[in-house]
Image (spheres, rainbow, N blue to C red):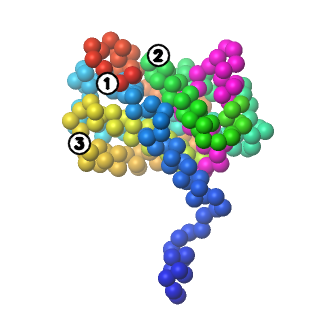
């Protein structure tokens, strides 16, 4: 067997276009995507200012975040994915509106709702600037029709992933990973958290991401709930901070 045969045997065959889909998914889940995610701490800045958030407890904090808030976002990300997975002709603007409104109702802190809506809107606009995606244009138009509604980041990511033909489970995992990565990055600017320790925290969270993604696949929308009052408090307190590095 020559070298080419060996390389072919080691590499499992991919479905047509899977390489391109994976690269596009990596691109859209990158924190460098210009949607403003690096400007948001989602309440972490308030927790640091109050002395509640410490480097020693970050691993446990983020594990709890993924299991609670991450699960809710993953459920709604999946639901949005399925709005277009059956084909663009199956897309329902009313279901799209309802999905975002139901997620907004699960975000008691105004600041968290506003941050999610800003990121979701920016994300959809950024993707629409990359190519022609009629179903995404329809989703944006539906959100702008009176009464205008917010487009939340999780559903926007799911909708885009379905429209671009990504794998559902990979899309949800990518969503969870980029969310955790953005928050860990925020902590590097708030706390004495070095690059190596930050990388280790994110590395060790991957098992929790997989477990959360698996749970989200079996969780109905009406059963998706989050109990993290400390994070909601942090988001509500953020506008009152005397100095701020982040928008939320």
Inspect the magenta stretch and tell me whether residue 145 lies in it. Answer: yes
Could you say whether the residue bearing mark 1 is in a helix, strand or loop? loop
- Residue drawn at (72%, 37%), measured in percent from left and top? 134
| Nearer to us in this view, 79 or 48 | 48
Inspect the magenta stretch and tell me whether residue 44 lies in it. Answer: no
Q: Point out which mark residue 110 bears.
A: 2
Disc 1 crowd rating (10 Å Cα; few below 14, some 14-19, many 20+) is: few
Which residue carries the number 1 mark? 245
Residue 62 figure quarter: top left
Please give left or right for residue 148 compared with residue 123 in the image. right
Residue 75 figure quarter: top right
Question: Marks 1 and 3: CB-CB under 8 Å?
Answer: no
For residue 136, say whether it is visible.
Answer: yes
Q: CA distance from mark 2 to mark 1?
A: 18 Å
Q: Position of residue 131 (x, y in %)?
A: 64, 42
Which residue carries the number 3 mark? 194
Could you say whether the residue bearing mark 2 is in a helix, strand or loop? helix
| Nearer to us in this view, 225 or 31 | 31
- Residue drawn at (26%, 45%), measured in percent from left and top? 195
- Residue drawn at (74%, 35%), measured in percent from left and top? 91
For residue 233, say whether it is visible.
Answer: no
Which contiguous range is marked in magenta? 139-167
Say which of marks 2 and 1 sits in front: 1
Q: Above or below — where is 177 with respect to 17?
A: above
């Amino acid at each position: 067997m020559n070298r080419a045969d060996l390389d072919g045997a080691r590499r499992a065959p991919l479905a047509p276009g899977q390489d391109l889909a994976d690269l596009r998914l990596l691109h859209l889940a990158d924190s460098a995507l210009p949607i403003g995610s690096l400007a948001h701490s989602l309440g972490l800045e308030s927790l640091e200012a109050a002395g509640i958030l410490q480097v020693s407890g970050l691993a446990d904090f983020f594990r709890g975040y993924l299991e609670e808030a991450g699960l809710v976002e993953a459920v709604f990300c999946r639901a949005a994915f399925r709005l277009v997975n059956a084909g663009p002709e199956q897309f329902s603007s009313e279901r799209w509106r309802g999905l975002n409104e139901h997620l907004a109702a699960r975000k008691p802190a105004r600041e968290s709702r506003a941050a999610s809506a800003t990121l979701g809107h920016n994300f959809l606009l950024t993707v629409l600037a990359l190519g022609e995606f009629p179903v995404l244009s329809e989703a944006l138009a539906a959100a702008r029709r009176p009464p205008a509604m917010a487009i939340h980041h999780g559903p926007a990511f799911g909708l885009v992933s379905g429209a671009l033909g990504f794998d559902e489970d990979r899309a949800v995992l990518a969503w969870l990973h980029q969310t955790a990565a953005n928050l860990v990055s925020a902590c590097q600017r708030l706390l004495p958290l070095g690059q190596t320790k930050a990388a280790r925290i994110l590395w060790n969270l991957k098992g929790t991401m997989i477990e959360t993604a698996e749970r989200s696949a079996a969780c109905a929308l009406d059963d998706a709930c989050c109990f993290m009052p400390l994070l909601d408090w942090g988001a509500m307190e953020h506008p009152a901070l005397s100095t701020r590095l982040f928008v939320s």
